[in-house]
Image (cartoon, grey):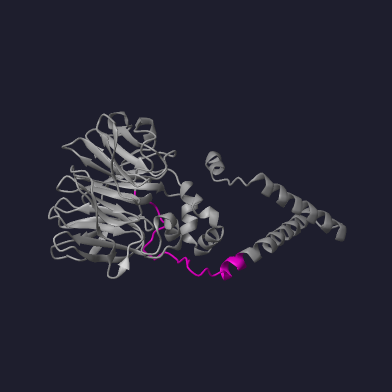
Amino acid sequence: EAASSDKCKVSLPRHVVRAVQGLTASARRSSSARCPSQAPSSAMATGLGVAAKAVLLVLAPVVISVALYSPKDFSPAELPPEHSFGPDVSAPRHDARVLAASERIGEGLLPGPEDLAYDAAGGWLYTGCADGWVRRVSVPGGDVEDWAYTGGRPLGVVLAGDGGLVVADADKGLLKVRPDKTVEMLTDAAEGLKFALTDGVDIAADGTIYFTDASYKYSLADHFLDVLEARPHGRLMSFDPSTRRTSVLARDLYFANGVAVAPDQDSLIFCETVMRRCSRYHIRGDKAGTVESFIDSLPGLPDNIRYNGEGRYWIALSAGRTLQLDVLMWSPLVRKLVYMVGKYVMAVPQGLRDSGTMSVALNGEPATMYTDPGLALATGWLKVGGYLYYGSLASSYISRVDLTKSSIEA
């Protein structure tokens, strides 16, 4: 029990301890001078009261200023009741040191690889990079080739039936890259509202393209402001190549992210990063046009999602759930304070770690999980044979996990 108790102790910074001790000592001297006969316990209580008042005198103006400050374009909201601060879902098998089994591919040649698409026929792995290039990597050789330049920031990528790619470009919109590497813009608006952060994408067997706009308000450069504001600016949409019609399927989403069409083609799964959940949208059947829960209370922030052809979806967790993240999301006041300290806003995502992936069955039941405390912003995972490939916004390479060297069975 003593050991258990020690684990629960909170260690305060030394300068805070010294400050409180100094205030307490000062209060004791002052109290003793006024009332020499006062009992030590009473003096200590008085000292602590003085210290508390001193802290309040310092903090009160700050809290009041933050509460009264109303920036014109930023208004953080409380999360809806369905957002859970309770226990996370867990996987029965968890490798929490996945970096130990990882090797780097194309180091220095792939800045910020965000999502992955695999061409089994050609033996190529495609990814979108921070410099506007879609690059491909030979598997298993690891040779890197500049494939197509979008001129924006390619995020989600998926193979098209003609051997090209469809790309969700955060800056440009939904793009088609043909086999000859020419780039065509398919759509960049729906219902008169321009996309600000085109994010995830997948293609159904009938050719319909399903994709997300994470936010119609914030661009990729300011994407974490969308997370801090915690308002539903995201949309799930479809694009019909035969009619070139863009349709909004679901709106008011909290940072809509990855999309994966189900193997039976009757539904798709999409992720909402802020809500730490993935939902099912019914494409056809009795429930067509409706949304229902697929998996909630994920142990991190979901990003891209991919079906692996083997009965599993792989959900990328760009960051693990932390106390820091919970405090941010629990309190709009704290998020407003972070916004006020502008230079700190983009430092927040850089400090989020314990990234990884969770594989789940077709019914949303967790199966396996791969994470690491040293892994940051791993946004796209793909299983190819006996390997797990993943990209990270914080790296300049793709990583490959040899599943035979992992501590668990995939």
Q: Percent from the top left, x then y, of residue 254?
A: 36, 61
Q: Percent from the top left, x then y, of residue 368?
A: 29, 41
Observer-nearest residue: 186 or 72? 186
Observer-nearest residue: 4 or 197? 197
User: Which residue lies at the image location 78% right of the left edge and 53% below the top edge?
Assistant: 40
Observer-nearest residue: 390 or 22? 390
User: Which residue lies at the image location 29% right of the left edge and 61% below the top edge?
Assistant: 188
**Residue 74 counted in the magenta span:** yes
Residue 21 is left or right of residue 409, and the answer is right
Q: Is residue 278 visible?
A: no
- The image shows residue 378, relative to residue 334, as above or below, that is above
| Residue 127 sits in quarter | top left
| Residue 271 sits in quarter | bottom left
**Residue 364 counted in the magenta span:** no
Question: Main structural element of the magenta stretch: helix, strand or loop?
Answer: loop
Residue 304 is left or right of residue 362, and the answer is right
Q: Magenta span covers which residues?
A: 63-89
User: Which residue lies at the image location 34% right of the left edge and 59% below the top edge?
Assistant: 214
- The image shows residue 189, relative to residue 307, as above or below, that is below
Figure quadrant of the C terminus: top left
- The image shows residue 385, relative to residue 29, as above or below, that is above
| Residue 395 sits in quarter | top left
